[in-house]
Amino acid sequence: MASRAPELLGLGMVNVTLTQALAFISDCHLSFHQRVVQLSVPMRGHARNALTRFALGSSRCTRCYSTRQALIEQNAKINAFVHISPESTASTSKTGALQGLKVAVKDNIATKDSPTTCSSAILKDFVSPFDATVVKQLRRDGADIVGKTNCDEFGMGSLNVYSVHGPTLNPFPFTSGANNSTAEVEERSAGGSSGGSAAAVAMGLCDAALGTDTGGSIRLPASYCGVVGFKPSYGLVSRWGVVSYADSLDCVGVLGADVPIVSRVFDRISAFDTKDPTSAEPELREAASTHARRRLESLTLDSGRGKLDGLRIGIPQEFFPSELSPAVLDIFRGVLQSLQARGATLVPVSLPSSSYALSAYYVLASAEASSNMARYDGIQYGKRIPTNSLADLRNVASVYAQGRSAGFGPEVQRRILLGTYALTSDAFDNYFLQAQRVRQLVKDDFDAVFSIPNVRNAVEESEEGLEEPASKVDVLLHPSAIGSAPPLSLDSSKSPLDSYVQDLLTVPASLAGVPALSVPCPTMSTLLQREAEQGHDGWPVGVSVIGQWGSDELVLAVGQAVAEGRRTT
């Protein structure tokens, strides 16, 4: 079956059945376990290569100040950065709102002074001729762009192991003080696909980092690495200059050490952009912001005294699957008890369509990915691979397939195959359209539980309609992930598709396009002894706050309240 790779990855996929596609996927190049083992075993070899690349590969880097050199040396431990920018390109402003803030940028966001490879061999050494809108805004406000961070190839992955630069190592052992011996470091995933951004923040290599979130790619790494990760409402932050994975799901977000830093960066990059056709109109932004501010003013969120009077927090029952770790559930209960003791009201809610969200997400995301990846044919975009014979030159599909088979990694190939099948005439109705229907049901479920109206709907809300009934809530709260960071050396008996379950709790918010914030749980406070007694491994876990579309300010405020409770637990 593997011999059919060029045909399937070229233009001859239309007549392939789902059974054939899945059979090919199971044999495609390297299995998931083999891929992880090959990347994780020589982890420090990848790090040494990265250190050599940073030190010798660019003449500009030799002129960097000692702070950049220190960053290079620390990065060699975890492989969070794939490129470190010279000090001279720090910013274009010396008095901006982000002056002095060191910000890293994910490798799928265009920067004109450093490579944008999307951690893929097919875009090796590509340098964009322009900056993405978000990068322009950061530079304009005085931020120091310190470099580009590692990620899963084209953002496709949940563990940051599908990268041509090698996997990113979770920095928790280096930052917790529990292990100072490099030889004894437990190698765990930093999460994906924005694992490099989360690891860089957790390691203290930058103050904040930009990432992209398609189905949880910011919130999962934030949970695994013990940092704050924010996926804004879809359309609030410009995607112009971001390499597309799934256009209707991709969001640019922020990771930081705490909520105030994340909020500070978000405030500067959240603006209408005429270049982005999915950017929310100013009138829509203002309407949503007005509702959120009105609700915030009616609450008594006194973080200084720990008061949360009037805050109604929904607990979605579908977000506690059988795969959820008992230790994570116990920590989450502790967070709920803390919030309730400070005056918050906990309300059980149901989002019945969320049970189907993961399946719908992978159909839609893979379908959009197969379309977006079509541009990388080795002729218009992407690395060109010479054909093996003159006969191949007479077949356009062979020319394309040569480059795509060599340039794309196993996970990208897998999603291209699944997405192409979902868009065929035989499968379109049963897969793609059904997934779109499920997506709308997921959106309706969220609208039904929030007290703040969805301003994207054309229905005018009366003042009486804004008075929420007892079942309505301000935000939702749930565990960010089903467990702590998984090890890089996974069980070889597991299928590559088993890694998709990592997105179980993060996908619904992505399908609905609503804001979601992951905040670290109090695992290193007075709960530590109790957690150890109940089997928790001591690694970071997060709790996620979800709000109505456009209520990003409210979500961040509640996230800060959760963080305040974390420090007082």
Image (cartoon, grey):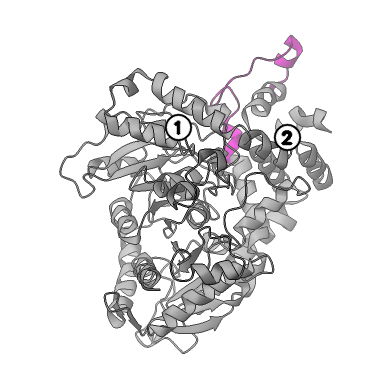
224 or 402: which is nearer to us?
224
Badge 2 crowding class, 10 Å Cα cut-off, few under 14, some 14 to 19, many 20 or more, is some
- Amino acid type, callout 2: Leu
User: How many angstroms separate mark 2 from mark 1 (CA)?
Assistant: 25 Å
293 or 427: which is nearer to us?
293
Q: Which quadrant of the structure image shows residue 530? A: bottom right
Residue at x 46%, y 39% (from the top left corner): 80
The image position of residue 335, as x and y in percent, is: 47, 74
The image position of residue 15, as x and y in percent, is: 80, 39
Residue at x 30%, y 65% (from the top left corner): 286
427 on left or right of 157: right
Secondary structure beneath label 2: loop
288 on left or right of 108: left
426 or 67: which is nearer to us?
67
Q: Main secondary structure of the magenta part?
A: loop
379 or 307: which is nearer to us?
307
Q: Is residue 75 above or below residue 49?
A: below
Q: In the image, which disc is placed on residue 116?
A: 1
- Write down the region rendered in magenta: 372-396
Residue 210: in magenta span: no
Q: Is residue 15 above or below residue 177?
A: above
Q: Quadrant of the C terminus?
A: bottom left
The residue that mark 2 highlights is 30
Badge 1 crowding class, 10 Å Cα cut-off, few under 14, some 14 to 19, many 20 or more, is many
Q: Which quadrant of the structure image shows residue 30? A: top right
Specify whether residue 277 is in view: no
472 on left or right of 120: left
Which numbered disc flags the more N-terminal residue, 2 or 1? 2
Secondary structure beneath label 1: loop
